[in-house]
Amino acid sequence: MPAYRRELFWVTVHVPDSTPAGRYQGQAVVTGKGKPLARLTLELETLPIKLEEPPFALGYNYSSPKDAEALAAHLADMRAHGMTTVAPLYNFHLPIYDADTSELGEFIEAYRRAGFTQPIYFGSPMQLISRLAGYGPVDSARFQQKFLAVMRRLHAEERRHDTPLLFSIADELTNKGRPGIEQGALLARLCFEELPEIAVTADMNGWLEVTTLAPWLNVATFNNGWDGIDHHNHGRRLINREFILNLQRRTDAIPWFVNAGSGRFPFGFFFWKMAKYGVRGKVEWYYNLGDNERGSLVRTEGKTVWPTLAYERSREGVDDLKYLVTLERLLAKARRSGRAAAAARRAEGLLARIADGIQDNWTAYTEGGETFPGDGFDVMAPSQAAGLSRYQALRRAVADAIVDLQKALPGPANR
């Protein structure tokens, strides 16, 4: 670190599950030329809480490193950051000119060993529209026969492993205007009719694209959308309560988000609020794009991973989600048992207060100037929140509610 410069350091403390609750102290020491220059006393409080895994698919697009050890290290890193799925996209072999699906099989096994809990979001098949262009247009028999053959080879590899895949077949066709959406609809209907055994989605970024393809898809994966190059969407946005509920009323597709924002709020409190309306997954751009290209959430060198702040903030968001999910599950247990009524009422009030403080429309945050937690949004008394940031106060309030419920519910499993 050069002289007379200020640097910021992000420190992540990993607390083993077996650590007793209590307060722990230590020091961070800054050295120069082997000599201590500054000391910072740190205090860590651990609570008697075991956070539960969110029942959602959360992850990032991923490029194959073509190295088994690097793959294992990257997957372990994503899992340690709270991710429950991975979205393999670039640099993965597709069996177009051969029948080799071994790379997919090796990835699935590494994914299982890393402890992921949700289906793999398989993004590579979305490249088939362009990779099979030499076979003719999407509506030609030659293109469709080849497309079906490749998809069946990949699905045969999936069946050899005990891990489900969700195949994404198209990539933001709103960018191509109405002709692109017509292409996507043809492909989605082809999968619906000819490949019912395969779970299918598409990465979508426009109102017309989603409403046209979703009836033929198992999962509708979308971001907030834009008008399209021919302005066919007329300003309609997608990440809001009204659209998500209407989508589920009109189709059987399960809503997921894609490229809808990294960081703490998108992965945490906002996703929690949208999950109340049926959203079940979120895949973001991009863990390791190319050779550490701009847009990557980490920098990699073989097995070594250097995280960015955006990536660490995403982990904080997933941790927020874990606290909320843990409190909700304890609250459900209290309701079933009829016990801990007072603690349950306090928890219900806290969760309702948090939910009411989150706008149901992502555009309010991206274009309307809304922030979370907003001014005047407090969940703790000023004396309790002294010295805490707003996010810290929110998490502490949820943690205290968990401890409160655990104490009130009978049985060692709640302590």
Image (tube, helix red, strand yellow):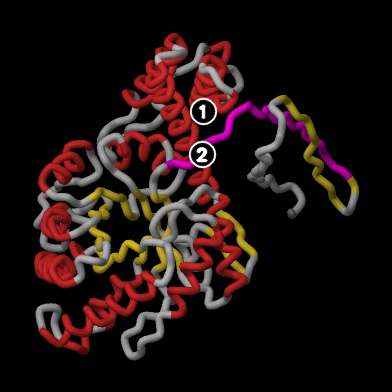
Where's residue 26, x and y in %?
79, 34
In this picture, is 373 found above or below 112? Answer: above
Q: Residue at x 56, y 69 (%)?
A: 71
Amino acid type assigned to the residue bearing label 2 in the image: Asp
Residue 376 shows in the view: no
Residue 197 lies in quadrant: bottom left
Residue 319: image tag: 2
- Magenta span covers which residues? 36-54
Name the residue: 53% across, 66% down.
110
- Inter-mark Cα distance, 2 to 1: 9 Å
Residue located 16% across and 46% down the image: 247
Return the residue at label 1: 395
User: Residue 39 vs residue 384: left or right?
Assistant: right
Q: Is residue 61 above or below residue 96?
A: above
Mark 2 Cα shell of 10 Å, populated few (<14), some (14-19), many (≥20): many
Secondary structure type for disc 1:
helix
The answer to which of 111 and 6 lies nearer the viewer is 111
Q: Position of residue 374 (x, y in %)?
A: 39, 26
For label 1, count other residues whose C-alpha is less than 10 Å away and answer few (under 14), some (14-19) or many (20+): some
Q: Residue 378 sits in which quadrant? A: top left
The vertical placement of 407 against 119, above or below, is above
Rendering quarter of residue 175: bottom left
The percent position of residue 350, horizontal first and vertical second, equals 41, 19
The furthest residue to the right: 35
Q: Is 119 placed above or below 347 here?
A: below
Say what amino acid the circle numbered 1 marks. Answer: Arg
Q: Are marks 2 and 1 in contact (CB under 8 Å)?
A: yes
Disc assigned to residue 312: none
| Residue 255 in view, yes or no | yes
| Sequence-first disc among 2 and 1 | 2
Quarter of the figure that contains the N terminus: bottom right
Is 48 one of the magenta-colored residues? yes
